Amino acid sequence: MRETKLRIRLFGDPVLRKKTKPATNVNQAHRDILSEMTRLMYAASGGIGLAASQVGLNESMIVVDIGSGLYKLINPKIVRQEGKQIMEEGCLSIPGICIKVKRAKKVLVKAQDEFAKPVTIEARDLLARVLQHEVDHLKGRLILDHASFFEKLKIRRKLAELKKRSRNEGLSESKTKSCQLQL
Ligand code: ZN
C-alpha cells in the first residue's frame, strides 16, 4: 500500500464543516484511503467509526466496526429510518466531549463497497447510531449540533481549548476523559 499521511482532524479544522462530494470512479486510491482510515480508527482508543472528512478528505467514505465486522462504505445514504433512541456519543475529532444524541433506532443504508458494488445494510441500535454519526460527518454535521443549550454552555471552554489545539498541532495532548462511544 502506498504511504498515505492522513491524520484525524480536530474541532476547529474547517474541513470538519465541509460537505463531502460523492466519490466517483472508485479505484485503488480509494481503497488505500479506506485502509488507512481503518488503521486510524483501530489505532484510536475505542474508535468504532471514522468518516473521510475527519481525515481532511472531501469524498464520501466511511469506515465502521462496532466489533461485529468491518464496513468500508462509499457514498453511504440513509434511505429509511425508524424509531428513536438517545445515547451519549463522543467523537474522535472532539476528544473529551460527550453529548446525548437522539437518533433513529433502525436505519436502512445504501452505499457502495470498496469495489463500487452496491450494498444495503439494515442496522439497528449501536450500528445504526454509528452509521448515522458518520453520515452526519459527511454532511459537515457534528455531535455539537445535537447539543442542548445547557450542554453547549457546559462545553464552551473545552471547545475553545480544542480549537487552540487544532491550530497548534505540536502541542502535547492533554488528558481527556473519553466517552462511551468514540466515532
Ligand atoms: Zn465523529
Image: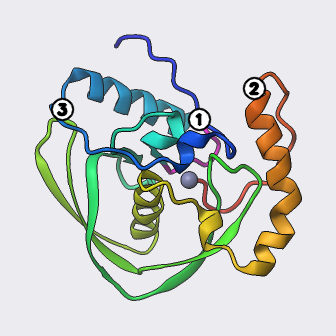
In the image, what residue occupies the spot 60% across and 73% down? 146
Question: Quick one: label 3 or label 1, which is nearer the N terminus?
Answer: 1
Q: Is residue 46 magenta?
A: yes
Task: Check disc 2: other Cα within 10 Å, few if <14, some if 14-19, many if 20+.
Answer: few
Instruction: Name the element at disc 2.
Output: loop
The residue beneath circle 1 is 8
Instruction: Name the element at disc 1.
Output: loop
Measured as percent of width and height from the top left, residue 150 is found at: 80, 79
Give the dominant element type of the magenta stretch: helix, strand or loop.
Answer: loop
Q: Is residue 6 left or right of residue 31?
A: right
Does residue 183 appear in the picture of this structure?
no
Measured as percent of width and height from the top left, residue 51 is found at: 45, 45
Going by the numbered disc 1, the residue's amino acid type is: Ile
Q: What is the quadrant of residue 29 in the picture?
A: top left
Measured as percent of width and height from the top left, residue 165 is found at: 80, 36
Which residue reaches farthest left?
A: 117
Measured as percent of width and height from the top left, residue 157 is found at: 88, 57
- Relative to 124, does residue 58 appear above or below in the rendering? above
Question: Quick one: label 1 or label 2, which is nearer the N terminus?
Answer: 1
The magenta span reads: 44-49
- Alpha-carbon span between mark 3 and mark 2: 32 Å
Give the label on residue 26, or none: 3
Give the label on residue 169, or none: 2
